[in-house]
Amino acid sequence: MSSSELIRVLVTQPFAPKLIQSIQSISSRLKIKHIPTKNPEDLKKYWATVEVLYTAKLVPKPEQAPRLSWIQAHFAGIEHLLKHPITNQVHLTTASGVGAKSIAEYVIGGLLSLNHHIPGFLEHQSKKIWSPKRLQIFVPSELQNTTLGIIGYGGIGQEIAHLANAFGMKILVTKRDISEPSINSWQFPNPSKIQQDLVAKLYLPEHLHIMLKHCDYIVAAVPLTEKTKHMISSSEFSAMKKGTVLVNISRGKVVDELALINALQTGHLRGAILDVFETEPLDVKSPLWTLPNVILSPHVSGLTPNYDQRAVELFANNLKSYLSGNPLLNEVNIKRGY
């Protein structure tokens, strides 16, 4: 790539003009085309010349975009993009880490809500009940001196560990490799330094059952791949001690939902906090809607008013790396699927 050659960048997300301007200001070599759309027909005439694509879902066929070199995804989850042949032929990077702080707060907030009976308070409030048995039915559980198991120790898992540590929780982790987190992953400017010594013990994925039996709380924070689909099912629930709480903020299909429902209905699990489901929207007939020990949300844990700003910061960092020929942050290993 010539140092003076124009690089045509197509952005399909509805970013504010000031964010587009911040991308353009990186280099005079960048020619930014901003087409905020969900309709692939709107992009057909641009594919042939595009070298860099920023998108959530829309990607071209290989023959439509002969110059395409790199796709930056707007979200951390990219299993839907991997279905397209062109992702095997170009660099693909994710927005992993952009929503990590918000998701970590969601996890801790959910645990506090469940432990301190917030759903029960709200129900009693709506019915104007001041229960004479309140001192018996609203006894809380504390996070301090309990054990949290985090399945997956990427950017989200690390942020969860950072907050959980502040509540005095012992942290166990499963990780694909037990070396230091990759240097080629996104962190916020001036991030809170997340030390490896926050983690009491690291486990390889094949030792998941050993970790589960020690945990009071389990958080699923892995990407969805062929290997992680239903990685939490009946045998994993059996490995958990009675009274465990499960949090799923990864992908719905990481957890076998029927096995989860059974574990909740039988009382083996004390509760579950769920932001993702095997089928979305969640079927209105699902027992998860009405189980009293479940807090659920419609796949929104990663939302933050700062998402677009942070996503553009990541994209800008990667554009600078691309221009200088340096490695890109959050690049996907196609064979691994994340």
Image (cartoon, rainbow, N blue to C red):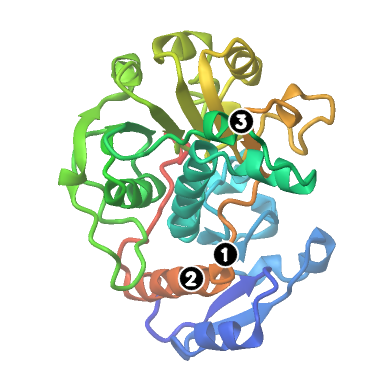
Mark 2 and mark 1 in contact? Answer it, CB < 8 Å.
yes
Residue furthest out toward the left: 197
Q: Mark 2 to mark 1: distance in Å? A: 10 Å
Q: Quadrant of the C terminus?
A: top left
Q: Kindly identify the amino acid type of the residue bearing the numbered disc 3.
A: Lys
Q: Is residue 327 left or right of residue 285?
A: left
Query: Does residue 324 appear in the picture of this structure?
Result: yes
Q: Which residue is under mark 1?
A: 304
At 23% across and 61% down in the image, what residue appears? 193
Residue that numbered label 3 is attached to = 133
Where's residue 29, x and y in %? 47, 86
Q: Quadrant of residue 100?
A: bottom left
Examine the rendering and report whether any part of residue 51 can be seen. no
How many circles with numbers are drawn on the protein? 3
Question: Mark 1: which amino acid?
Answer: Thr
Q: Mark 1 to mark 3: distance in Å?
A: 38 Å
The N terminus lies in which quarter of the figure?
bottom left
Mark 1 or mark 2, which is nearer the start of the sequence? 1
Whichever of labels 1 and 3 marks the residue nearer the N terminus, that label is 3
Q: Residues within 10 Å of mark 1 (few under 14, many from 20)?
A: some
> Label 3 to label 2, Cα distance in Å?
47 Å
Q: Who is closer to the viewer here, 270 or 213?
A: 270
Q: Position of residue 88 (x, y in %)?
A: 52, 44
Looking at the picture, does residue 263 appear above or below residue 69?
above
Q: Is residue 32 left or right of residue 198?
A: right
**Amino acid under disc 2:** Arg
Give the residue at x 69% y 46%: 122
What residue is pinned by disc 2?
Answer: 310
- Mark nearer the viewer, 2 or 1: 1
Residue at left offset 40%, top offset 55%? 330
